[in-house]
Image (spheres, grey):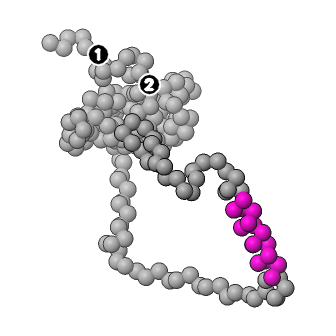
Amino acid sequence: MRHRVDHRKLGRSTSHRKALLRNMVTSLILSERIETTLPKAKELRRIADEMITLGKEGTLHARRQAAAVLQDPSAVQKLFNGLAARFADRHGGYTRIYKFGFRRGDAAEMAAIEYLGYVLPEPKPKKSEVGEEKKPEPKKEKKVEKPKAEKKEAKADGKEKTSKEKKAKADKPGKESGKKSSWGLFGKNKKK
C-alpha cells in the first residue's frame, strides 16, 4: 500500500532530484513543451502547476518565490507576464501529458508535457518535397588586368614565400618523408 508516500524519488538523491526538477520546470516555462520520461513528467506537473499559481498571484512575494525555484530570470518574466495571463480564468490543470511509446535504449516510457494552449511549430518542408528549384549561379566577376610591372613583382614575392615555406617545413621535427609509421596491436610501430 502507498500510504503517506509523498513523491517519486526518481532514483536520485534529494539534492539531485530537486536540481533536476528545477531545471525541467525552467525549460518547460521557456519552451512550453518538453519530452521526458513519464514518471519525471508526472512529478514535474506538480511543480509546473504551482509555478502558474504563483504567476497568477502576481505579488512581489510570489515573484521572489518563483525566482527561488526557476534558474533563469527570463523564465520568471515569461511566467508572470505571459503564462499567468493565459491561465487567468482557469483553476488548476494547466499542463497536459502525452504518452508516446518507449525509449529504444532502455525501454523507458516516454512522454511529452506541455502547457495548455501550446501550438506545435509547423515542420519545415524538405528540399525534395519543395521541388528542385535551380538556384541562379553567382555572377562571375570580371578580372581587371594589372600592369606587367606589378605582375612581375607579385610573381617574385610568391617565389620567395614558397621557398621560405619549404625551409620551414624541412626544419620542423616530426614525420620524415621517407619513413612511414603504422599502428600495431600494442602501440605504434615504425617501419624502416
The residues tagged by marks 1 and 2 sit, at their Cα atoms, a distance apart of 18 Å
- Inspect this view and state whether residue 85 appears: no
The residue where tag 1 is placed is 6
Q: Which residue is mark 2?
A: 19
Q: Spot the residue most to the front.
A: 192
Among numbered discs 1 and 2, the one appearing first in the sequence: 1
Magenta-drawn stretch contains 153: yes
Name the secondary structure under disc 1. loop
In-front residue for pair 56/162? 162
| Rendered-image quadrant of the N terminus | top left
Residue 185 location, quadrant: top left
Q: Is residue 155 magenta?
A: yes
* Callout 2 amino acid: Ala
Which residues fall within the magenta stretch? Answer: 152-167
Q: Residue at x 50, y 83 (%)?
A: 136
What secondary structure characterizes most of the magenta part? Answer: helix
